[in-house]
Image (spheres, rainbow, N blue to C red):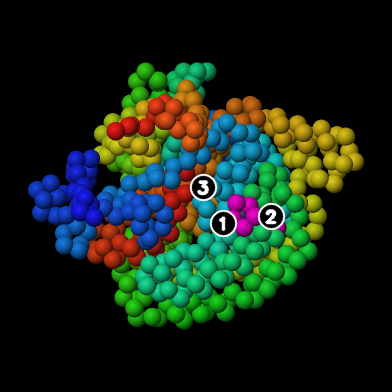
Amino acid sequence: MSEYQLQEIPVGPYKHLVSERAISGETMILNMGPQHPSTHGVLRLVLELDGEVIVNCVPEIGYLHTGVEKNMEAKTYLKAEVMTDRLDYMNNMGNNLAYVMAVEKLVGLDVPPRAQALRVILTELQRIASHLVWLGTTALDLAAMSVFLYCFREREIILDIFEMVSGQRMMVTYFRPGGVWRDVPVEFEAAVRDFIKLLPKRIDEYEALLTKNPLWLDRTVGIGKLDAATALQHGVTGPMLRASGINWDLRKVRPYMGYEQYDFNVPVATQGDTYARYIVRVQELRESLKIVEQALNKLPMGPVRSDNRKFVTPPRSEIGTSMEALIHHFKLWTEGFPAPKASIYNAVESPRGELGVYLEGDGGPKPYRIHWRTPSFDNLSVVPQIVKGHLVADLIAILASTDIVLGDIDR
Amino acid sequence: MDNKLEKIVQTLQEKFGATFEEFRGEAHVFVKPEQIVEALTFLRDQHEFALLSAMTAVDYWPQESPRFHVIYQLTSLTQNLSVQLRIPVNGSQLKVPTATGVFAVANWREREIMDMFGIEFEGHPDPRRILLPDDLDGHPLRKDFPLGYEEPQFTFNFEEIDVRKPYVKE
């Protein structure tokens, strides 16, 4: 074992980002990650430490870069969709929604009301699942093991519902341009209703374990304070922005998919610390449940896809009996549909913030350029600002509270 | 298009001589690269566009000249409006003034554009690659960068293919 030696991290590449004291050797440069259990993925942080206090923090990202934007340029609009699931792997339905809405806006497609309601139900369930993972892993990072197990138990129910409707637990690709893949099975409604009945009690349990727990309060209150002006400067959106006192939720201010029909609140906190972000997300769990319940009560009957055959593939049942349906099916899957030579930007509210898609067509069947404005990317960029002066242990809490997903950051 | 947005676009046209396109209710305003910092500051301070939602670039090689467009998507929270600024960037002179002084979020976004398109941002405080390895040659989101693949190695041809692999060998 003697050949293992500690290696010093060269200050060279980070010279302009660390203080003078690091260059003289007075403070210490410490590497954290990319293989570290509490960086929530493959994130590397270069820390400048004075004792245990953080002087500077430099995030190094890109370990999970897959070139999705470039790859999508080589696929047709229909086929490129499978890659959207792989970006933010905690928000698959939400990524699908952002993408299909962008395509629909670009080519000008309408979505039937039943498909819209199904999209709302499933994205809200996905938001709950994502927040549950966040809550579980954050609690785990701050040494509350049982919450992690409880949260994953409930998330499993949601993944079972996803499997029921799409055949996949995570990489669903269930929303398609013009509607959804196919109608939900008969058992769907009962399964969701059971879940709606179950979860409020479970949220009470998590809150009983954490909200007034002195250990939890010690680790979160006043840690990583982010004021509204800094948050906006750094492009922070989502629950993090709302925890800093700015009421901005795209579901409310720019309703899409019929969100305007549902009655829900946007939880806002003003303290801007780690505890405020916890409170906002737990409230959002309850609000999402309200939306799911209302959407399920109002769920209209009717088709789940647009019948515009120039863009939307016909249902399986028609292909066997109609020659035209077969031709459309074949043409759409081999050649794809052309989109106008224009560009649009479409944003939806993901569990982490504004998930935007910049989509540009060139008149052909493939996207000319697609850019994903992912919320985790900007939310992480503010972390070096807010960790300064905190302990390394608090960095774990702050990083967890930003709810980053590295697949979302690196794309 | 919204009335308020129309007025803002008009003031931009008067002040910066900007040209303007509209598609599905979205306003795309073209300004000159050297005016971009001024235009962003103007929108932020005079019209409350406090959030730079997204920033990206597009490569139009070889059909169009100037080759690149750098895109700034701005959001006003108070007025609930969005406007998109676009600057054409010539392929022979890849220099754009940095917007980090106006919006701190531009720091990482510009590093990404630098990484993916090779557009240089003058005055950027931290001009390093962000997503790709430092020793990578080229800028992948350019249209002249091929969408390549990696040859799979098996036991019988491991050595043979290893010679051709792009990574650095000891």
Q: Quadrant of the C terminus of chain B?
A: top left
Magenta residue span: A165-172
Q: Give the residue at mark 1.
A: A251
The image shows residue A403 at horizontal and vertical percentages of 43, 59
Q: Are marks 3 and 2 in contact (CB under 8 Å)?
A: no
Residue A3 visible somewhere in the drawing? yes
* Residue type, mark 3 in image: Leu
Q: Give the residue at mark 3.
A: A87
Q: Chain of mark 2?
A: A
Q: A141 or A194, which lies in front?
A: A141
Indicate the secondary structure of the residue bearing disc 1: helix
Question: Residue at image x 44%, y 42%?
Answer: A65
Q: Chain of mark 3?
A: A
Question: Residue at image x 32%, y 32%?
Answer: B169
As drawn, B33 above or below A10: above
Q: Which mark is first along the chain, 1 or 2?
A: 2
